[in-house]
Amino acid sequence: MSAWVLLTIGGAFLQNLRSLLQRRLTGDLSVNGAAYVRFLFALPFAWLFFATTSYLHDGGDFSFMPNGEFLLFIGAGAVAQMVATSALVAAVSGSHFALGTALSKTEAVQAAVLGLLILGEAVSLRALAGIGISLLGVVLLSGNIRPADLVQADRRVWFGVLAGTCLALCSICYRGASLALLNDIAVAAPMASSGFYQTLIVAAFTLAVAVTLQSVVMGAYLVLAEPGQIRQVMYQWQPALLVGLIAMVASVCWFTAMALHNAAMVRALGQIELLFTLATSVWLRHERITRREVIGIALLVLGILMLF
């Protein structure tokens, strides 16, 4: 099994675990405060991981200089991810939670389009069909959604589409940032390690820079718009550290997978997170699986299998 497949599945599983732990912080924090935890407390772990992987590099002299293309991609990706977080909150805050969530899951389809427009990367017709089938499965798993809901829903639910667009854009931008470094990398000594290790170091650096930008920008927003939330975040440092660590490991998996392979394919496979979420609901909340969900699972799995 390809490395990007294993990394994507690992990232999806850890993202589900992070969301489960992060949800427990919302009792004492605002939605934005709880979201900020994933950035701020992942920050030291991200730089530590990058420093460690760089130090353990076989050649011992691994260096690269961020170029203008990298900075453009990483800045756009970091901002897009923060906008996606806020847009998703707006989409699901109304009476159409399931519909807003489902619309946000159009990210894989949008990533295929944006990947072609921005990076010139196309996906095969078979993979595109798989993305469409898996999206249908996602809709069935997201709740009891009827076509009429698209007409009757309030305007806030369309923030779900915006969230999907921004999630797709940030995935494309993070892949573009990694590729910009990989294409312009300078190695002082001959590399004794594999290409995968080189990609891992670049992905780790891309992640560390992105999380740094997000911590600074979102931190400034909380100081100005939600005074007191930073202090509340610091009070929650013990459980937040675990959330930050898991968020960092999950992001390393995502970033490395997207540096290795087409971002649209990675995001499509990443929808397997819904299966982990469903399994968590059955295991922890003892919820029963409906016939609709069984069909949704079958379509999601079929769509994912068509990616390969």
Image (tube, rainbow, N blue to C red):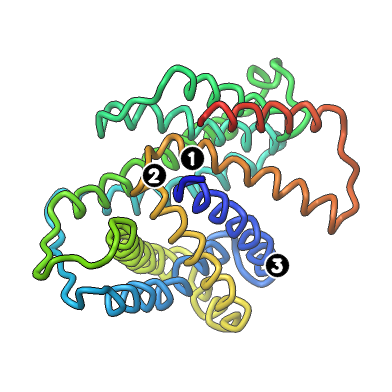
Query: Which residue is at 12% across, 53% downward?
Result: 184
Depth check, front residue: 28 or 228: 28
Along the polypeptide, which appears first: circle 2 or circle 1?
2
Q: Amino acid at mark 3?
A: Arg
Residues at circles 2 and 1 in contact by the CB criterion of under 8 Å:
yes
Q: Secondary structure at mark 3?
A: loop
The alpha-carbon separation of the residues under discs 2 and 3 comes to 27 Å
Q: Which residue is mark 1?
A: 267
Query: Which residue is at 41% across, 33% downward?
Result: 111
Q: Quadrant of residue 173?
A: top left
Is residue 213 visible from the viewing direction of this image?
A: no
Q: Secondary structure at mark 1?
A: helix
The alpha-carbon separation of the residues under discs 1 and 3 comes to 26 Å
Q: Amino acid at mark 1?
A: Arg
Residue 171, which numbered label?
2
Is residue 93 visible from the viewing direction of this image?
A: yes
Query: Which residue is at 15% across, 69% downward?
Result: 63
Q: Amino acid at mark 2?
A: Ser
Along the polypeptide, which appears first: circle 1 or circle 3?
3
Query: Which residue is at 90% across, 42% downward?
Result: 288
x, y percent for residue 213: 31, 63
Depth check, front residue: 165 or 200: 200
Against 250, is 257 above or below?
A: above
Depth check, front residue: 94 or 286: 286
x, y percent for residue 87: 50, 43
Left or right position of 213 against 149: left
Depth check, front residue: 235 or 182: 182
Left or right position of 245 against 82: right
Viewer-side label of 1, 3: 1
| Residue density around tag 1, few if under 14, some if 14–19, many if 20 or more, within 10 Å | many
